Amino acid sequence: MRRISIFGATGSIGQSTIDLIRRDREAYDVVALTGGGNIARLAQDAIDLGAKVAVTAYEDRLSELRAALSGTGIEAAAGDAALIEAADREVDWFMSAIVGAAGLAPGLRALRHGKTLALANKESLVTAGPLLMDTAKEQGARILPVDSEHSAVFQGLVGENPAEVERVIITASGGPFRDWSLEQLEGATLEQACKHPSWDMGQRITIDSASMFNKALEIIETKEYFGFSPDQIEVLVHPGSYVHALVGFRDGALMAHLGAPDMRHAIGYALHWPERRDLPVERLDLAKVGQLRFEAPDEIRFPALRLAREVMATGGLAGTVFNAAKEAALDLFIARKIGFPDMARLVERVLTEMSAGVSLRVNALSLETILEADKEARARVFDLKAA
């Protein structure tokens, strides 16, 4: 049996992972499940899977979790320290699916055991790519990408020489506002931003998709994980979400990864790697699809893509600041305190201010400097809103 832990178990990626585990229950020994405020879901999954410990990120929900697990023998815990302790438990495969920068510290801790980290938490690579990749190398651990785009690139490189790659194209659905004008975007509501045309995801990721911040993070993630230069990385809007990524080689060939928009493709590949096994996903009927549509992204309406390239050019702590400011601005939009386009405006102002006030180019990233920059960037967003 393989020992596994799932961090972010109550989110969309975590639930899809659990779905696959349930289909082959005898093959896995579930050590830890963690989640946020959905205590009932977390407790029930822990009971169903026989987890050793269940952890909620919210300390004020601990009594509720304990009550839900009463009599089961499953340990209940809460808070940041409990997440780190759970990440320290020995496993063979660790799913990092906590949304946001909060997933960085547990992922880093899990890498210390030299096993496999299935990485769905793109913010870890955006905020601390060199630190994460260096830690994996030092510990003899393996990081497998779980974002659909990066899993697709990873698969496209199997048996290939990365030095012969000319370009990498990651696709974006375009979200619900793909065809909206700048004037329409000014009035975009929270409810409209939460209606993704292709994927079934959580609220925060769905809004990030609508603003293209999700794709901006993935551009940076591509650079950090694969080591490609920024000018090798392209984005195409593909409304159907059937083509997840393409890898272009020096001879002009393009290798494309296609599949129905279902995250269990990428999760299952990471779960069973280096093998391929049967997955309960829709088989793509290309005759039914009929045609594949692509278009260039509009970086005027969706400036997050431009900002991502500026972040890559700056390096150092710029990724940390970019992600932290984005998360804080997203909080404000969800709270209906700012408009949809204001998110990008706030992120750009914070990047500009922090670039001018203190050098973001550091020689070596540490968790401490990352957390300090993260905290300052979030504070600046709220200060700008209050001004």
Image (spheres, rainbow, N blue to C red):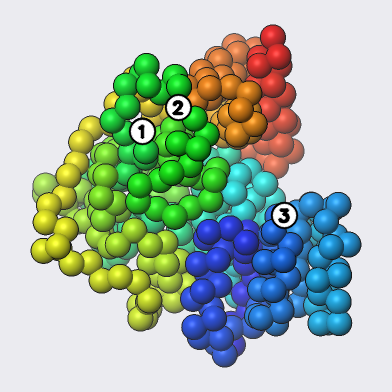
Q: Amino acid at mark 3?
A: Gly
Q: In the rendering, which numbered label is found on residue 177? A: 1
Q: Residue at 86% across / 70% down in the picture?
A: 67
- The reply to whether residue 299 is visible in this rendering is no
Q: Is residue 347 left or right of residue 376?
A: left
Q: Which residue is denoted by mark 3 in the rendering?
A: 37
The x, y position of residue 260, in whole percent, is 30, 62
Please give the name of the residue rendered at 88% of the width and 62% of the height, measured from the top-left corner: 63
Name the residue located 48 percent from the left edge and 42 percent from the top edge.
Answer: 194
At 70% across and 42% down in the image, what residue appears? 367
- Helix, strand or loop at label 1? It is loop
Which numbered disc flags the more N-terminal residue, 3 or 2?
A: 3
Q: Which residue is mark 2?
A: 188
Above or below: residue 225 compared with residue 316: below
> Alpha-carbon neighbours of circle 1 within 10 Å: few (<14), some, or many (≥20)?
many
Residue 332: x percent and y percent? 63, 28
Pick the residue in front: 169 or 200. 200
Q: In the rendered view, tell whether residue 202 sits above or below residue 176.
A: below
Q: CA distance from mark 3 to mark 2?
A: 27 Å
Q: Which mark is residue 151?
A: none
Task: Report the front residue among 307 and 159.
Answer: 307
Dots 2 and 1: beta carbons under 8 Å?
Answer: yes
Q: Earlier in the sequence, mark 1 or mark 3?
A: 3
